[in-house]
């Protein structure tokens, strides 16, 4: 009897041992392992929650932009049932150069918008100009970051892109039309097209608050194609980014943490408990942007305007049952403050400067460093951001484009609201978990609506 009962027990134990061994050897390929990973509160990691909605590229962009024919020089299009004609107007209204300012992802946003505007105005697009900016420690041009030939090839059929102007206007400077500060119902056809027709060559900086939903679909399709399909890093930069990605232990979470002196200074928020070095750096960056005080400071913070500290970030990660031994790639710029608030809890934090410490990395400027973070983040197993900035919007949309949906934006407003309610300990953790879980289930914030459509299970 003893032999009969022990043998099945041995088989069961041996089988379970093999299962556990396989699970730990191949964690990034085994979803069952993730189910087994729990926090001390007993909740499974948030990625295991079943989603009911997600965002996918719209069919009118991937396929529908082909169901059209040109009706004239203005570039208007008409749907043709069952026919596929990928044609552009034969005659252009002129040439547009998009002038892009700021960090890499802000310039990328301007480029995407500029492509849509150029298509709307039936213009030929000259390669964009990335402005040199001392503030961003930047001197990289478009061709230093992105593969020019690939961009031109991928935009074929959406809009004509050229490297050089025709001989008859090659010596003239463009007439600049600054749209960046325009607000409200700004109409490019009424306001910009006359300058394009008159001068034949203009440069634009797109309006920050433009309504892309008013674009005809052929212009929106050009914008979407430029943003998510046509921008590939140069071969040398992609090689460096791939080396960085491969060097990071798998699986890993890419965390875009924003708590640099200029970021805090710009937010006009005050923090208690920071180190003297952090306080000094923030004061040096404030210039004339003094922090809000009294009731105004309270209202500002409750609106979610204050960046999360690394310590607050660690607290939210724990509420989402992210194991403290998780490999975290820190996608962040130089000068990040109070990082010990994160690394004292999550001890497996890696950075690009630690992995790529060669001379070529030290010579990199802001755009090329940001491109490395972008590449790693759109390919990581999961992605979280403490801010909803240009990079986060681009990364989330590209992850949705690639079918990667483990993406969450940590909510500053919800965190502040719970703190003002006096929630602590278990109540605070449960509140944070519930709020972010609801967002993740519904797919909220995981992609931009301009080029992506909601899909319900």
Image (cartoon, rainbow, N blue to C red):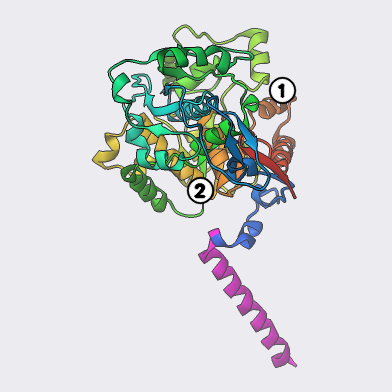
Residue that numbered label 2 is attached to: 380
- Viewer-nearest of labels 2 and 1? 2
Vertical arrangement, residue 412 with respect to residue 433, above or below:
above
**Which residue is nearer to you in this view: 107 or 71?**
71
Q: Secondary structure at mark 2?
A: loop
Left or right: 134 in relation to 300:
left
- The residue drawn where x is 59% and y is 69% is 20
Disc assigned to residue 420: 1
**Which residue is nearer to you in this view: 123 or 307?**
123
x and y percent of residue 447 in the render?
A: 61, 37
Q: Locate the N terminus by quadrant.
A: bottom right
- The residue drawn where x is 36% and y is 38% is 148
* 327 drawn magenta: no
x and y percent of residue 418 in the render?
A: 72, 28
* 14 drawn magenta: yes
Vertical arrangement, residue 61 with respect to residue 287, above or below:
below
Residue found at the far left of this picture: 359
Q: Please tell me which of labels 2 and 1 falls first in the chain.
A: 2
x and y percent of residue 38 in the render?
A: 65, 53
Residue 351 visible in the current orientation: no
Q: Dot 2 surroundings within 10 Å: few (below 14), some, or many (20 or more)?
A: many
- The residue drawn where x is 73% and y is 41% is 442
What is the magenta segment's predominant secondary structure? helix
Within the image, what quadrant is residue 204 found in?
top left
x and y percent of residue 61 in the render?
A: 60, 40
Vertical arrangement, residue 351 with respect to residue 186, above or below:
below
Q: Which residues are magenta?
A: 1-28
Q: Secondary structure at mark 1?
A: helix
- The residue drawn where x is 42% and y is 30% is 104
Residue 401 visible in the current orientation: yes
Q: CA distance from mark 2 to mark 1?
A: 34 Å
């Amino acid at each position: 009897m003893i032999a009969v009962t022990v043998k099945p027990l041995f088989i069961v134990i041996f089988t379970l041992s093999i299962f556990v061994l396989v699970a730990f050897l191949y964690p990034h390929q085994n979803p069952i392992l993730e189910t087994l990973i729990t926090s001390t509160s007993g909740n499974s990691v948030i990625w295991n929650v079943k989603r009911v909605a997600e965002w996918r590229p719209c069919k009118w962009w991937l396929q529908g932009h082909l169901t059209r024919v040109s009706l004239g020089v203005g570039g208007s299009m008409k749907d043709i049932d069952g026919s596929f004609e990928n044609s552009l107007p034969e005659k252009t209204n002129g040439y547009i150069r998009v002038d892009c300012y700021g960090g890499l992802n802000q310039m990328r946003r301007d480029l995407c918008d500029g492509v849509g505007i150029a298509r709307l105005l039936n213009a030929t697009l000259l390669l964009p100009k990335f402005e040199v900016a001392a503030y961003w420690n930047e001197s990289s041009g478009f061709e230093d970051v992105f593969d020019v030939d690939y961009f031109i090839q991928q935009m074929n059929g959406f809009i004509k892109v050229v490297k050089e102007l025709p001989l008859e206007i090659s010596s003239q400077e463009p007439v600049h039309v600054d749209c960046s500060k325009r607000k409200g119902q700004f109409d490019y056809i009424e306001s910009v097209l006359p300058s394009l027709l008159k001068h034949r060559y203009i440069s634009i900086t797109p309006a920050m608050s433009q309504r892309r939903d008013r674009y005809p679909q052929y212009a929106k399709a050009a914008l979407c194609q430029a943003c998510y399909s046509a921008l590939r890093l140069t071969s040398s930069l992609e090689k460096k980014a791939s080396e960085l990605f491969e060097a990071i232990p798998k699986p890993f979470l890419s965390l875009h943490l924003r708590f640099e002196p200029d970021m805090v200074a710009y937010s006009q928020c005050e923090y208690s408990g920071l180190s003297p070095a952090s306080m000094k750096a923030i004061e040096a960056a404030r210039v004339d942007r003094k922090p809000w005080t009294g009731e105004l400071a309270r209202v500002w913070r409750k609106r979610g305007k204050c960046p999360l500290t690394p310590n607050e970030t660690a607290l939210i990660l724990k509420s989402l049952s992210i194991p403290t031994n998780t490999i975290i790639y820190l996608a962040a710029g130089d000068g990040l403050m109070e990082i010990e608030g994160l690394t004292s809890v999550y001890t497996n934090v890696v950075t690009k400067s630690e992995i790529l410490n060669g001379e070529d990395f030290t010579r990199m400027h802001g755009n090329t460093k940001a491109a490395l973070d972008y590449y790693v983040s759109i390919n990581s197993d999961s992605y979280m951001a403490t801010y909803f900035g240009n990079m986060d919007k681009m990364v989330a949309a590209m992850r949705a484009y690639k079918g990667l949906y483990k993406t969450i934006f940590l909510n500053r407003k919800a965190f502040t609201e719970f703190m003002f309610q006096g929630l602590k300990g278990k109540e605070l953790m449960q509140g944070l978990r519930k709020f972010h879980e609801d967002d993740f289930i519904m797919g909220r914030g995981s992609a931009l609506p301009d080029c992506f459509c909601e899909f319900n299970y």
